[in-house]
Image: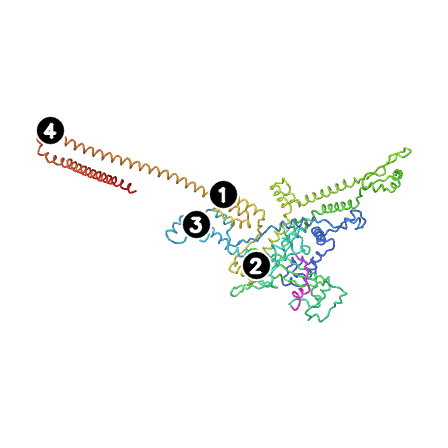
Amino acid sequence: MPNNPPSPSSGTFGTPLINFQLDKISIEKKSDFQWGKQLAESILSKVNGGSSSYFWVRNQRWKTNRNYANGRISMQKFIDLLEFNGKTNYVNLNWQCIHIVNRIISGLVGRWMNRSEKIMVTATDSISTKQKQDEYEYLEFIISNRRKLEQLQQASGVQMIPQDQTLPSDKEELNLWQSQFQRLPEEILYELGINDVLGACGWFDVLKEKMLHDSAETGFVGTYTWMDTEGVIHVEWLKPENCFYSYSNFPDFRDTSWRGYMRTLKISELRRKYGKEFGGVLDEEQLFNMAQGAKEYQLYDNITWMTEWNVTFLRPYDEWNIEVLEFELKSVDTEAYTVVTTKKNKSTIIKKGRPQNKADNEEVIEDSRINIYRGVYARSTQTMLEWALKKNMIRPQDPKETGNAEFSYSFYMVQSYDMTTLGVPEKIQEPADQMILARLKMQQLVAKMRPTGTAVNWRAVQNIDYGLGEGNKAIDFKKMFDQTGDFYYHDQDAEGNPIGVPFTEIPNAGFLPQLQALILLYDKHYQIMKDELGEDPNLISAALQPRVAAGNVETSQQMADFATDYYYSAYINCLNDTAKKVSCLLKDSVTYGSKVYRNISGIDDIGGRMFSTKIQLLPDAVAIQKFELMMQKAMDTTPEMSLFVDPFQLMRVAKEDVKLSEALFRQGTKKMILHQQETAAQNQKATFDAQHDAAVTGETEKRKTMTAEVQMKGQIESMISKEKQKEIILSGIFGVYQKGIQMPTELKELEAEMIKNVAIPLFAENIRNISDLISQTQEEDTQEEDMGQNSDIQPQNKEVA
């Protein structure tokens, strides 16, 4: 490399872009407007390279696609195909084209608009990762030792298990929570901020529809992401025809060195951005010269430059439009720093720049990083309006990539091959043209179709015998034949010569086969169109036919998605790249003091953290409906399912992720099965315990009964034994007296006790029995007296009666 790099005007070392990127030039020198003008002119020469250049051919193809997609097909070429010799009004044909391509594009975009998506944010820094890991390990510890913790909590009265949140019940549920639900508050707030930025710019409704039309019609989409001086983030939609870029081998243009956009600005906007009164480079006369290049400028308007327009509040050319070239260029910049070590106290001093003569105590260190330069060029007057390092440059959040920088432009080309793509109208242009031609031939055939005619044998008509009546000569036989279809005539004249048939009907038999052939041709090209497109545009109409199973319709719909959904993926990939840039700018906006997004996330929430973004496709209405039907059917057959799953929660989750809802539903089903098994085991155990208790109780009662019987038998036997003893003793006592033997003295006392124990109770019983007998006799006498008195009174009562 040369020690003295070339000046911007020299151009002796190749193109300006090569010199700019490869020469060791300082950022200050690269920011020279002369460099920017040469680079702008170099890029403009590639963009406006003539009718054979890449961008001209690309835009012509895209213009044709746009016309087909919007029903604006030029019918001039079909005049030559039909050999009408340029007579556009030939046989009064209707030269309006069919709009089947517009219907196909509208159907595809309408189907894609029914899908929803949102930006997901994940914190990837070490602080957030450690915080998530600690939270996971804490819950894992609680799950593993839950019973012990509950016992300690009950014994000590100290809260050890969180009560304000639903804890996972097992390790499987914990892993599901970690993969799907574990979110830091900072992640939620940051995600809310990014989605709010995109939603405020219209990227989930209006701009989404425009980008989907761009993808289907041209196969190319683009956005422009930037942040203004107030810290507000803007995401603009870019018209594909106005975008330009360097060569790339990738559909997302990741290896491009420059990108840009041909923008149309009003003179008032140029004055506000680049006028000298606002710190720019343009005075009012230069603005007027630029206005002369606008399409609105007409020589007969008598609008000429006047000095008074320098101070006029309103000018007639303020709303005129001119084109400016906005572009960004990526360059690797190397800055040299000189590290000086003082000889006296060995301290270190860092100076910017490279010394002319390097000393022994000096060391040159180079710092290389990728920078983005932004330029604005007015091609009508060849004026460089802006050229410098881009303000609010987009740099990745990862500290490992701080030396990198991203373009503000996000481009994506569908199935990029040699920088070209294939839009939907281009895929089906040939069969669409043939269908239009078949329709025109049908019109031509119908317009030139001859009616059913009649062959008139004039000689036979002249030889018709009118008879002798004078009135018969006035009969119009042709009119009679047309009205009735009947005609009477003699087949021979008076001399016997044969007379031909006067009228013979001529049917137009050749029209119908031609028309049927054209209909078959139209249907054949429609089939070719379906083959080229990869799906049937009349799929819904086919689904309404009888004997078409729902599974076949669903399979056809899936195949259609596979054939055309890569156009929808262009929008997804471009929006995903845009979201990453919004994420970087949002962090810069909050970090460096902007108050626009402080209500969403503050510096304490994002300080020291790094966030990665990805777009999540939300399920469509069909997937949500299938899940709800499945869940409703399961809950109808198993009503107790509602005790283990919350159907309203699952429906809310299904709007975000159907697979997650299915996992939660399976988890609830698993809990229900485990509960049923546990309940069945408890019921079986309770049955066994009841049977065991019943057996134990029966055995105990049986033992009590047997014990009572034994005791009763013992008492009976004891009583019997005592009575026998008494009987034996009394028998002995009376036997002694019967034999006339005197009772021994030692037995006198026993005899007295026996008589007392036996005789006295007998005497007492006898006295009680006699008393009862007397009482009974007295009661009977009293009753007899009462009955006698009643019998005496009764006859008197009868007499009185």
- Taking the image as shown, residue 779 lies to the left or right of residue 679, namely left
Mark sitting on residue 142? 3
- Residue 94 placement, left or right of 103: right
Residue underneath mark 2 = 586
Q: Secondary structure at mark 3?
A: helix
Q: Give residue 738's mark.
A: 4
Label 1 neighbour load within 10 Å: few <14, some 14-19, many 20+:
few
> In the picture shown, does residue 735 fall above or below 355?
above
Question: How far separated are the C-alphas under marks 1 and 2?
Answer: 49 Å
Q: Earlier in the sequence, mark 3 or mark 1?
A: 3
Quarter of the rendering containing residue 384: bottom right
Residue type at numbered disc 4: Gln
> Looking at numbered disc 2 in the image, what kind of residue is underneath it?
Leu
Residue at 79% from the left image edge and 40% from the top image edge: 510
Please indicate, yes or no, whether residue 7 appears anywhere in the rendered image.
no
Residue found at x 40% / y 48%: 148
**Residue 403: image x %, image y %?**
58, 57
Q: Are marks 3 and 1 in contact (CB under 8 Å)?
A: no
For the question of whether residue 208 can be seen, the reply is yes
Residue 157 in the image: x percent, y percent? 38, 53
Q: Which region is colored magenta?
A: 259-277
Tell me which label, 4 or 2, sits earlier in the chain: 2
Question: In terms of sequence position, does the residue under pointer 3 or pointer 4 come before the other?
Answer: 3
Quickly name the residue at label 1: 638
